[in-house]
Image (cartoon, rainbow, N blue to C red):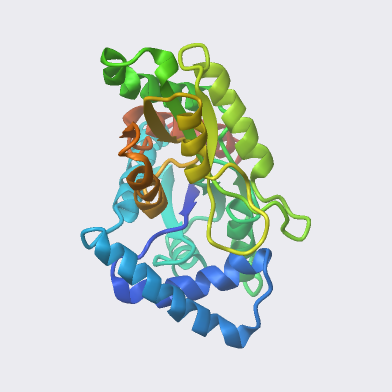
Amino acid sequence: MGERVAVLLTGYGEVEHYDEFAEYNEKSFRLLVSKSIKFPDRAIPYLSRRLERRQRKEWHAANHYHSPHNDIFERQRAGIEANLKQVYGDDVAVYKTFNFVEPYLPDDVLAEIQKDGFDKLVVYPWLVVDSVYTSGLVLEQINHALASNSRWVKDMRYLPSFWEREDFQQRMADQIIEGIAPLLERYVPVQVGVALCLHGCPLESKGQETGVRESTALYYAMQERLIERFPLMTPAWMNHPVPGKWTTPDVDQAAKNLITLGAQAIVFAPIGFVTENHETQLDIGYTIDKVKDQVECLHLPVLNDDPELLRMGAEWISPLIDELGGAPAS
């Protein structure tokens, strides 16, 4: 009989109700934005409320937008757990936690894991690349949570990112090729511009890893898999309206560049994400609204709860579970 292992699947989370914006924003400013920009504590509530007004207006204008992120994330958690239970039985359980909405890591989830009798953890940021804003944020919160009570955790493993997994890259490439196929009934491949959309990154963050290195490597890995079919290709960085130098070209500029090169259609493929959210839906949508009178636009989904992704996601952490003493169920 093997050891019992808890898998901690972590993500950002998104608001379910508009009245959650202020708290979401305040946590984001304190935990995320402060890593590149220093705000006085007293300014954060004001900035949070100001951003909330803009968010309410934008989401309301987008047909009372409701993010599907949290529902999809739960299906991803359940799918990864189901795949793991086929191997390990009930000795492995997958818990979800979000950074900015419930269930919170320090307050809710670690306490639940301890209560359920697990003392070995696999920390699994369900985010494509490693950075101080993704995996680093999770580790920071775990350390805060365990500062006063860490003795119950006997051992831990950690998977910082999965962008370089070849099976992941190939699954995304296959989905992009399948998605573009209908356009090739009307255009030759050189007329189809492909914008590979990545999460934007500040170029400076107090010397910490911002995700630029791994995101750039992911773009080139995907380009290598697709360029012979679709030669008109560009990175498209989904930046935030935060001061400082950010990655270029942003999505708007990337679309303009493709049009300049003669694209008759543009495919927006968000490769930097595995869970649909307001950035992959609304922000790309804003760019499409600006160029749709000039070119045909195709907005591809991310992999979400694709069964193959969830099978792979379970396989990626199985070696870590084995290291912690997990054993196949008899």
Q: Is residue 197 placed above or below 285 in the rendered structure? A: above
> Can you give x and y, in whole percent of width and height, for residue 266 in the image?
39, 30
Furthest-right residue in view?
207
In the depicted structure, whether residue 184 falls above or below residue 317? above
Residue at (66% x, 71% y) in the render: 147
Could you tell whether 154 is left or right of 172 in the image? right
- Quadrant hosting residue 187: top left
Residue found at the far left of this picture = 63
Q: Residue at x 53, y 61 (%)?
A: 241
Residue 285, x across and y down, in percent:
34, 47
**Which of 195/296 is in front?**
296
User: Residue 119 placed where, x, y %?
Assistant: 55, 56
In front: 230, or 9? 230
Residue 73 visible in this rendered orientation of the protein: yes
Q: Could you say where residue 142 lies in the image, as x and y percent from the top left? A: 60, 62
**Number of marks in picture:** 0
At x 63%, y 35%, the residue is: 216
Looking at the image, which is closer to me, 209 or 161? 209
